[in-house]
Amino acid sequence: MLAAVEWLKDAPAIVDALEAAGWVFWPDDPGRDFRLWFLRPRPEARTHHLQVLQRDDAHAVALLAFRDALRADECLRSAYAQLKCQLAEQYPNNRNAYTNAKSDFVAGVLRGVGVEVPARDRLPE
């Protein structure tokens, strides 16, 4: 999930409010330079992810463009779902490898809709 905010500089208030609502803040997130990352219910058994990004950040723009591309194209949605299932089987215990392996697909979709792919480091596997 994505929560776009006007200013990420309000991070302490955002963290406090979301933690009070039951979200676990993940301060060691590799993307902490551009987002706040939360999960539920606990790190060893995450079922929900919430990214808080500044509305005008290139990563937020890319995430929304990717979402919109999937919504607009049933074949693209199916291909992405199939890829995610394949990668979940291939990397059942390595979330970072799973995420890294999706990056080329995501970048191709973004380029296809004319959105610049934001620079992002590969996650350590």
Image: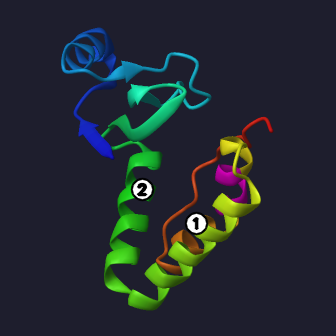
Res. 55 visible in picture: no
Which mark, by number, is residue 47?
none
Residue 5: x and y in percent read 24, 34
Question: Element at badge 2?
Answer: helix
Question: Element at badge 1?
Answer: helix
Identify the image quadrant of residue 87.
bottom right
Identify the image quadrant of residue 36.
top left
Amino acid on which the number 2 mark rests in the picture? Leu
Residue where numbered disc 2 is placed: 63
Q: Residue at x 47, y 77 (%)?
A: 113
Rounded to the nearest angstrom, the CA distance separating label 2 from label 1 is 9 Å
Q: Residue at x 30, y 15 (%)?
A: 15
Residue 56: x and y in percent read 33, 44
Over which residues does the magenta segment extend?
98-103
- Answer left or right for 48 relative to 31: left
In the picture as drawn, the residue positioned furthest to the bottom comes out as 75
- Answer left or right for 16 relative to 116: left
Residue 35: x and y in percent read 44, 31
Which mark, by number, is residue 106?
1
Q: In the rendered image of this protein, does residue 89 appear above or below residue 27?
A: below
Is 100 a magenta residue? Answer: yes
